[in-house]
Amino acid sequence: MAQGEIQVGPVRVLGVSDATVDYPWPLDELFPGVSVGAWADYSARFPQVFANATTYRSDYICYLLRAPDRNILVDTGMGPSSAPLAALFGQGGQLLDKLAAVGVQPEDVDTVVLGHLHPDHVGWNVLPHDDGYRLTFPRARYIVHRADWDAFHTPEVQAHFPFPFVDQLITPLQQLGALELIVADHALSPEIRLWHTPGHTPGHLSTLISVANERALIWGDVAIHPAQVTEPNLNAMFDMDGAVARATRAAVLDRVEAEGMTVAARHFPEPGFGQVVRLEGRRYWQAITLPKQV
C-alpha cells in the first residue's frame, strides 16, 4: 500500500492534494466571533495548519477511490491556473499530475462525486475547449446533490463570491451530458455510499466506505479545521446555514467516534487521514501519518 493510502476491504482510498494555500482572511474573520488568542492551543497542537498566528494554511485534498471495477474521484480541487480560485491564489493545482504519478489518467475515472459546489471542490471539472468546454474526466458521471445545484444557480449565492465560476465550472456539466443529480443518500456500490450532510452547503455530501466492520468517511467540509473536532460549534464564514452545520458536525462526530471510523478530511494536512480520539474527556483530531489498514 502506498504512502498516503488506506484500504477498506477491496476499496483503496488515496488522498491527493491539489494545492496548499494560505487563506487571505485572518482567522478571526474566517471563524467569526473567535479571538486570535483563542487559537494558541490549536496552533501548538496542529502547527501545520497555521501559516502564522492569524493565518490558516489549508490543503485542498481530493480522494481517489479505487474499487475492483471502477475509479471514483471525490472532488476536483482548485483547478488549473485558468480556474478562478487558482488565479486568486496565483497558483495552479496539481491534481492531474499527481493522478498520473499513480497510474491514473483522466479517462480512467468513471465517477466524480462533487461533495459540494464551492470553487475549491470543482476546479478541474472541465477545461476550456474551442469556444466552450470539455470534460476533464471524459468518461465520468459527475454526481451533485440537487439542493446544491439549485442553490449555486441563484444570483444570491453567486453574489457572495468575488469571481464568477458557476457558469465556467459547474453549468457545463449539464450541457455536456455528464451531470447526475441526487436528492437523498445514494449508493454508488455495495461498499460506497453518499451521505447527505447539509449545513456547510444545502446539498453537502460525505462519502462512506463500509465493508463488514471496517469503515472510513470522507467528510468533506463538515469540519475544515482540526479545532472544529474539539469545538464543533465553531462555524466557518463559508457555512451557508450555521445552525444546520453545527448540528450536522455534532452528529457526524458522534457517529465517527461511536463506530471507530477512519476519517479522510478535505482541508487537513495531506494525506488527510486521521481519527477522532478522546483526551481528558475532550475530542481531538489525531492524524494518521503512515499507511494504515483500517
Image (cartoon, rainbow, N blue to C red):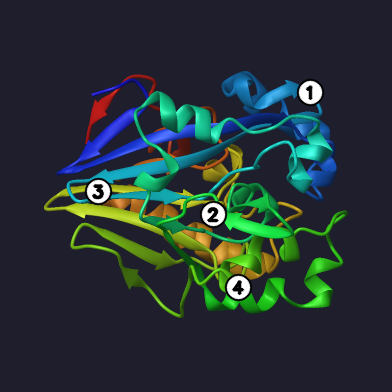
Badge 2 is on which residue? 222
**Residue at 70% in and 60% down:** 132
Please say if 229 is above or below 289: below
Question: Which SS class for mark 1?
Answer: loop
**Looking at the picture, which amino acid does disc 2 mark?**
Val
**Looking at the picture, which amino acid does disc 1 mark?**
Ala
Of the image marks 1 and 4, the number of the one nearer the N terminus: 1
Q: Nearer the viewer, residue 126 or 236?
A: 126
Badge 4 is on which residue? 175
Q: Residue 281: x and y, percent?
A: 43, 39
Question: Which SS class for mark 3?
Answer: strand
Can residue 235 be seen in the rendering of this structure?
no
Left or right: 171 in relation to 164:
left
Please say if 149 is above or below 119: below
Question: Which SS class for mark 4?
Answer: helix
**Looking at the picture, which amino acid does disc 3 mark?**
Arg
Badge 1 is on which residue? 53
Of the image marks 4 and 2, the number of the one nearer the N terminus: 4
